[in-house]
């Protein structure tokens, strides 16, 4: 294994795994596997990039650090030459959040300074300029992320956010340096006394420049875009072959589970509901025990072949009302368990195509499906929409797509199911 990734949630893990598997033409990408938590066995010998997906974005800081260091230990044992700490392209982390402390623990473990911090993903509208994070033409705190139910983002200055989370110094590599080329970025990073360096990136070309600049760096941190140029370094050095990702499509029953409350997911649900059977989950009913796994599976099975969707997604006011009544963490845990148990029941009944929306929901579902099939590695298949690949589990594969809330086109759910069946 050449590159090891520690991702703080499952959809983020899928996102960066997709980036590593796809790579950049003409070199292509790396043979990539995603793991649901820290594996207990060695990786398959052909795997060139391994992505360990944790549920550490919203856990207590000490727990997130412990999990991340355990993931680091396993990846180093597999021979990884470069470690990437992957977090969301909207830097989901409150002033008391986990990104800074985890990055600090990893940097100290690897004895690194001048560690790149760059959540930019220009294809999805996330850019970093003057150390500030933008979502399309809005600053992060004006993009809707300030209303996120778990990690409301109220400060777009990444340097200030990191300084609030750690005792470490934070530098900045401005776009003027990035525009001059990899040599200048590398020299700037190497000359820094600061532990971290927020690096501006407003285009894929900038990310490729940064990727070239960090060749040989023990640790890099960022969104999935930071990995854009990393496979090319190893392929050009003839440490990997490159090329296309192998993929086996799957026929069979299908289901869509949506737990995200993002505006993008709500729009996708509305689009799908106009064309396919859709069930809105009564969240208070779930909390009170009157809505169960049997209700969801019965609806899905009654509409087999019709791309059925069940969802708990609601608007900000609706979400806040439920959280105030039942508690934020209790509501999230109950819904995650409901979706996980539903996925487990569907796979047990032979379902082979499952699409999931929402980071926390995806993590719960991925673990449930892996446990049901007795596997811990998910092979990365073709990309559905930017940042969202198909994942293949098992020999007679069950195919899963894990979509972060804000990702995907309006017709994402239909497209995902079609690609799982045809491969294109």
Image (tube, grey):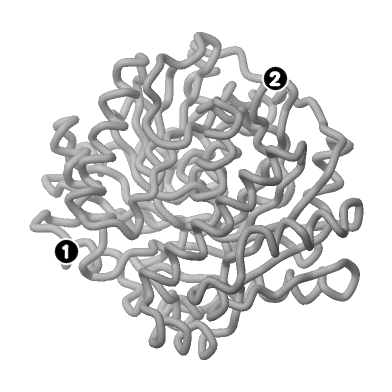
Task: Name above or below for residue 233 compared with residue 191.
Answer: above
Q: Is residue 153 left or right of residue 297?
A: left
- Residue 312 at x, y percent in the picture: 61, 72
Q: Quadrant of the N terminus?
A: top left
Q: Is residue 29 left or right of residue 376?
A: right
The label number, if any, that marks residue 87 in the structure image: none
Residue at coordinates 53% horizontally, 80% vertically from top-left? 284
Badges 1 and 2: C-beta atoms under 8 Å apart? Answer: no
- Residue 407 at x, y percent in the picture: 63, 60
Q: Quickly name the residue at label 1.
A: 163
* Label 2 packing within 10 angstroms: few (<14), some (14-19), many (20+): few
- Residue 328 at x, y percent in the picture: 38, 75
Residue at coordinates 69% horizontally, 38% vertically from top-left? 348
Residue at coordinates 11% horizontally, 45% vertically from top-left? 193
Location of residue 42 by image quarter: top left
| Of 289 and 216, the residue lying toward us | 289
Cα distance in 3D space between marks 1 and 2: 46 Å
Q: Quadrant of the C terminus?
A: top right
Q: Is residue 404 left or right of residue 131?
A: right
* Element assignment for label 2: loop
* Label 1 packing within 10 angstroms: few (<14), some (14-19), many (20+): some
Mark 1 vs mark 2, foreground winner is 2
Task: Name above or below for residue 125 compared with residue 49.
Answer: below
Residue 116 can be seen, yes or no: yes
- Residue 118 at x, y percent in the picture: 38, 52
| Of 262 and 278, the residue lying toward us | 278
Residue 352 can be seen, yes or no: no
Location of residue 310 by image quarter: bottom right
| Of 150 and 107, the residue lying toward us | 150
Location of residue 315 by image quarter: bottom right
Q: Quickly name the residue at label 2.
A: 395
* Element assignment for label 1: helix
């Amino acid at each position: 294994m050449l590159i090891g990734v520690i991702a703080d949630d499952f959809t983020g893990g899928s996102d960066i795994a997709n980036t590593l598997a796809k790579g950049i033409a003409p070199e292509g990408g790396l043979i990539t596997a995603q793991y649901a938590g820290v594996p207990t066995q060695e990786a398959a010998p052909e795997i060139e990039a391994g992505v360990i997906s944790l549920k550490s974005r919203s856990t207590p800081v000490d727990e997130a650090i412990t999990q991340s260091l355990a993931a680091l230990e396993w990846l180093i044992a597999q021979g990884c030459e470069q470690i990437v700490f992957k977090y969301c392209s909207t830097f989901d982390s409150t002033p008391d959040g986990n990104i800074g402390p985890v990055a600090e623990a990893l940097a100290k473990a690897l004895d690194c300074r001048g560690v790149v911090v760059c959540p930019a993903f220009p294809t999805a509208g996330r850019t970093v300029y003057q150390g500030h994070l933008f979502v399309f033409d809005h600053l992060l705190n004006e993009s809707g992320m300030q209303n996120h139910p778990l990690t409301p983002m109220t400060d777009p200055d990444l340097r200030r956010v990191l300084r609030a989370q750690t005792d470490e110094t934070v530098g900045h590599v401005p776009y003027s340096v990035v525009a001059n080329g990899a040599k200048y970025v590398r020299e700037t990073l190497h000359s820094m006394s600061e532990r971290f360096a927020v690096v501006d990136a407003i285009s894929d070309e900038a990310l490729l420049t940064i990727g070239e600049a960090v060749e040989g760096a023990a640790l890099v941190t960022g969104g999935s875009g930071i990995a854009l140029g990393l496979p090319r370094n190893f392929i050009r050095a003839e440490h990997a072959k490159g090329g296309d990702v192998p993929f086996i499509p799957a026929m069979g029953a299908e289901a869509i589970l949506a737990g995200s409350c993002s505006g993008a997911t709500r729009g996708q649900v509305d689009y799908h509901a106009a064309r396919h059977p859709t069930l809105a989950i009564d969240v208070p009913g779930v909390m009170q025990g009157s809505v169960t796994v049997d209700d969801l599976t019965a609806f899905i099975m009654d509409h087999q072949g019709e791309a059925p969707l069940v969802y708990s997604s609601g608007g900000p006011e609706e979400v806040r009302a439920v959280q105030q009544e039942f508690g934020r963490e209790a509501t999230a845990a109950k819904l995650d368990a409901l979706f996980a148990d539903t996925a487990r029941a569907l796979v047990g009944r032979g379902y082979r195509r499952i699409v999931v929306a929402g980071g926390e929901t995806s993590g719960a579902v991925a673990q449930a499906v892996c446990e049901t099939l007795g596997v811990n590695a998910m092979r990365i298949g073709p990309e559905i929409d930017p940042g969202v690949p198909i994942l293949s589990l098992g020999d007679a594969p069950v195919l899963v797509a894990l979509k972060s809330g804000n990702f995907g086109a309006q017709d994402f759910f239909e497209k995902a199911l079609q690609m799982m069946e045809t491969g294109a």
